[in-house]
């Protein structure tokens, strides 16, 4: 029996979901390396978790620390250690290898695809295609593939509870949704900010405002209590001033009137990098000129006519927006923080594709074509080509795919007749390009673990301090623990 277009579209989405999940497994057992942030975050959290395992709680007090094999360990007080204790339990079952730690995040990354599927079902219950499209977007974004096994404090682990909050809220289970936000709060501070979109949602639906406000107060008390515990003192004013007012990621030259423009450029760059230039264009177009249409004149009428789709975007992506506004300096240097926005962007991109596939008026006027063309050019031009590439040729190949698919999109929107298969083909091409770029990023040669294996063999043979012209790194400290090493800068690793 010949399949209709709707069935083919769902089948394509299912293929993309499986493809995206499989790509998360690439390099699952790779060692922690020098430059790759996928590995950099891993070596820190692995060290923290391993030190918590081997240090009596009466000594560590449950506070993350590293260098537990030294006389002066370094204590980490920036985020709750919930994820470390969770990974402790996970690796006790599945082993403490690199794969053991990465599969912990992988589990929640895959769970988030399922949660976004359920959120999309509530957002557009009349459509059986939209949930599959939303889940496919979450799967094939480069951020989902690359950071889907990224064991850091700010990760898919926290996003799971934020999406759980969004799903419960859309089901009008406000109290349970607020509890989900409180659980997210105990995993990382952006979790507390999820109460913001939830509270805004209660105003839109006209119920649960007082309950969410009370949970917000409870969440604030919880945050302060956790901070006091982490710092082992009541005076946390200086810490909050530093974290909220002057984290130190933006230089004096970048501050002032130029800072908002720089941050806007960073948003475009990071969206392009985590989604792909083409998919970032689709999401931004839906936000600005599509069903989202945030830039309108009749605000009162607009807010009165918001649909569950708008509520879903608010709940799934609003935490990332609030976090970016309050902590924009962190977003200037940490691209993985934009993961907190990507579920909302996945919904927006999926809605654009759905309307295009169904022949709805996605691009109705010349003005809209011009706006989308400008956005496509910006996303393609500002994509950070050459970042952490393991192969120049591979990076050039990926760049051609990203630029070519975006130029093809521009050609499509200026054609008099839209082609749904052509757009879906470009989406599939972006999935392949993101997968290829994930491989490119992760293929950084193993230098740190292999160096430490040689250094350990030399130390066991000679019993003397190992001298090297290599530079010290966090990964070397982890793999070389127990070996006295004198590096080029004359600092001795423990």
Image (cartoon, helix red, strand yellow):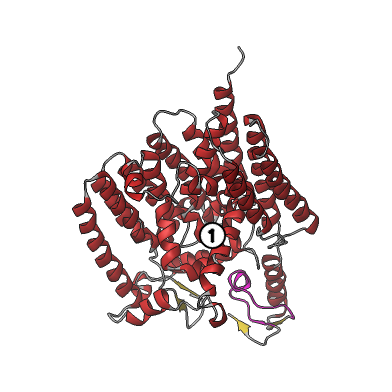
310 relative to 56, above or below = above
Rate crowding at label 1 as few (under 14), some (14 to 19) or many (20 or more) other CA atoms within 10 Å: many
Q: Tell me the SS state at disc 1.
A: helix
Residue 317 pos. (x, y %) = 43, 51
452 relative to 235, above or below = above
User: Left or right of 418: which side holds 189?
Assistant: left
Q: Nearer the viewer, residue 46 or 147?
A: 147
Q: Nearer the viewer, residue 210 or 464?
A: 210
Say if residue 389 shows up in the picture: yes
Say if residue 25 shows up in the picture: no
Question: Residue at the spot x=71%, y=54% of the render?
Answer: 440
Q: Is residue 356 magenta?
A: no
User: Left or right of 189: which side holds 279?
Assistant: right
Residue 23 pos. (x, y %) = 62, 45
Q: Is residue 476 magenta?
A: yes
Residue 478 pos. (x, y %) = 58, 70
Segment colored magenta: 469-487
114 relative to 315, above or below = above
Residue 237 pos. (x, y %) = 32, 80
Q: Residue lying farthest top?
A: 1
């Amino acid at each position: 029996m010949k399949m209709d277009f709707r069935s083919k579209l769902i089948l394509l989405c299912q293929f993309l979901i499986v493809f995206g999940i499989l790509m998360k497994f690439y390099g699952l057992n790779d060692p922690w390396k020098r430059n790759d942030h996928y590995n950099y975050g891993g070596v820190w959290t692995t060290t923290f978790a391993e030190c918590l395992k081997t240090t009596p709680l009466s000594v560590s007090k449950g506070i993350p620390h590293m260098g537990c094999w030294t006389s002066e360990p370094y204590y980490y007080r920036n985020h709750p250690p919930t994820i470390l204790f969770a990974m402790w339990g996970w690796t006790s079952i599945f082993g403490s290898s690199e794969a053991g730690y990465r599969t912990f995040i992988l589990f929640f990354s895959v769970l988030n695809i399922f949660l976004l599927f359920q959120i999309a079902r509530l957002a557009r219950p009349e459509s059986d295609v939209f949930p599959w499209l939303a889940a496919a977007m979450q799967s094939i974004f480069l951020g989902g593939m690359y950071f889907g096994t990224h064991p850091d404090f700010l990760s898919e682990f926290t996003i799971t509870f934020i999406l759980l909050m969004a799903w419960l809220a859309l089901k009008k289970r406000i109290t349970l949704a607020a509890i989900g936000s409180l659980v997210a709060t105990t995993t990382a501070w952006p979790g507390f900010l999820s109460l913001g979109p939830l509270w805004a949602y209660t105003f839109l639906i006209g119920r649960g405002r007082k309950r969410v406000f009370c949970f917000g107060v409870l969440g604030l008390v919880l945050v302060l209590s956790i901070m006091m515990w982490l710092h082992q003192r009541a005076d946390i004013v200086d810490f909050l001033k530093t974290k909220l007012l002057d984290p130190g990621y933006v230089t004096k030259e970048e501050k002032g009137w130029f800072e908002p423009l720089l941050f806007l450029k960073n948003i475009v760059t990071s969206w392009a990098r985590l989604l792909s230039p083409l998919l970032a264009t689709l999401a931004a177009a839906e936000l600005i000129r599509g069903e989202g249409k945030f830039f309108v004149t009749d605000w009162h009428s607009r807010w009165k006519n918001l649909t569950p789709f708008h509520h879903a975007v608010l709940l799934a992506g609003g935490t990332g927006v609030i976090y970016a506004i309050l902590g924009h300096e962190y977003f200037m240097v940490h691209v993985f923080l934009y993961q907190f926005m990507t579920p909302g962007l996945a919904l927006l991109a999926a809605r654009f594709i759905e309307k295009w596939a169904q022949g709805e008026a996605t691009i109705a006027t010349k003005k809209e074509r011009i706006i989308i063309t400008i956005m496509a050019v910006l996303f393609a031009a500002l994509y950070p080509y050459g970042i952490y590439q393991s192969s120049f040729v591979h990076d050039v190949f990926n760049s051609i795919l990203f630029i070519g698919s975006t130029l093809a999109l521009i050609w499509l929107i200026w054609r008099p007749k839209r082609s749904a298969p052509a757009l879906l083909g470009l989406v599939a091409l972006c999935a392949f390009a993101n997968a290829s770029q994930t491989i490119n990023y992760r293929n950084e040669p193993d230098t740190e673990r292999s160096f430490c294996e040689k250094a350990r063999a030399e130390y066991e043979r000679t019993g003397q301090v190992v001298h090297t012209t290599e530079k010290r790194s966090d990964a070397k400290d982890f793999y070389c623990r127990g070996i006295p090493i004198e590096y080029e800068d004359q600092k001795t690793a423990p």
